[in-house]
Amino acid sequence: MALRLQRGVCFSTLLKMPHVQDEDRSRRRRTPARDRGHEGVVQWMIWPRDMKSDHFDGRHFFNPTGPPMQPFRTVPRMLLSRRTPWPNRVNRVVGQPPPPDPTSIVLTFLGQATFLIQTGAGNLLTDPVWVERAGPWGVVGPRRMRPAAIGLKDLPPIAVILLSHNHYDHCDLKTLRALARRFDPIVISPLGNAFLLRSAGLRRIEEVDWWQRATTSPMPITLTPAHHFSARGPFDRNRALCGGFIISVAGRHIYSPGDTAYAPIFREIRDRLGAPDLSLLPIGAYEPRWFMRSVHMNPAEAPIASSGVPGTLLLYRPTWTCSRHTASECILVHFN
């Protein structure tokens, strides 16, 4: 099956969409989280019973391997570190989505961690964000430097949203509300995010743990580990899980990791699930290195993480003015 890279990445395939099931809540309990969240309301994180594991201690999730996380008290030092000036705005023409092709998968990079993946069985969005600021209420936080490649109103019908974690530059409630009203999509997310997503009007939500396969999506989707952290405020750090996704279509595998540092998880993912044909590895916001090495890869680490992957590697372009490196260091490239 041939692979070609143009505006998107196409695989020749045809998928069958199974029946969508409702979320099973029979084994869940609520645990309060002291997070005021995006809209200033107390959130409740929803956990399965007795789910202690190698990455959950009964109250908080954690990274079992890889570089240690910096404590919260080091954030002011990071924010005061020297920053390379970025342009306020990079203008580009906002386009239209590619025409549908029921025999292919077409992947379009929209910005940051947002990708439109069009298939004959339904279209997917990863970490959709269309706001001008990545922060609470849309008025604070990093400002958007590049507009999304396709306007929110111009999107084709969306069947599935893949949400990797709850950071504001990956999980925006205003965008999610618009998608919920227009498409009523299925949302696949790591554990602990369902209450937040329901507050955006989303109804069909499936939470999964690392290595679990979603049961409600129209194609096989498996949650993979990510070396990162979650938080919507100062009191809810790692109360929800972070993860990436392997999307499997007709023998092809697309890896969308969300945000992650370089860690042994890449070898484990290949060993368990096979080498992906396409990896959407994230780089960006990787300086100062003493702080960011535990949450984000840099351009030198991404090719190492992709070693052994036969397909194409896409690296993210910078979208938000929050990084200490230069805007030109983080570019879109591909390797055959």
Image (cartoon, rainbow, N blue to C red):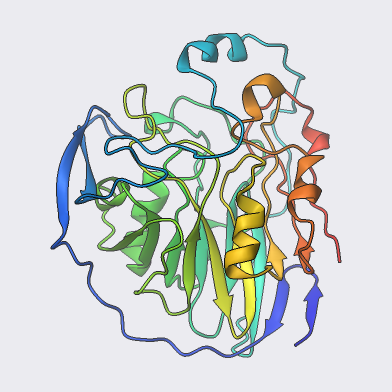
Q: Position of residue 293 (x, y in %)?
A: 66, 30
Q: Is residue 98 visible?
A: no
- In the image, residue 187 sits, relative to residue 296, either above or below, namely below
- Residue lying at 46% horizontally and 24% vertically, measured from the top left: 140
Give left or right: position of 20 versus 46: right
Give left or right: position of 134 versus 183: right
**In terms of depth relative to the viewer, which is nearer, 33 or 80?**
33
Indicate the quadrant where residue 178 lies: bottom left
State the quadrant of the C terminus. bottom right
State the quadrant of the N terminus. bottom right
**In terms of depth relative to the viewer, which is nearer, 19 or 295?**
295
Q: Is residue 24 visible?
A: yes
- Residue lying at 66% horizontally and 64% vertically, measured from the top left: 108
Indicate the quadrant where residue 107 lies: bottom right
Which residue is situated farthest in the right direction here? 336
Q: Position of residue 222 (x, y in %)?
A: 48, 66
Give left or right: position of 204 versus 323: left
- In the image, residue 142 sits, relative to residue 10, either above or below, namely above
Q: Position of residue 134 (x, y in %)?
A: 50, 34
- In the image, residue 301 sits, relative to residue 157, either above or below, namely above
Q: Position of residue 126 (x, y in %)?
A: 52, 58
**In terms of depth relative to the viewer, which is nearer, 107 or 247?**
247
- Residue lying at 47% horizontally and 90% vertically, measured from the top left: 16
Q: How many marks?
A: 0
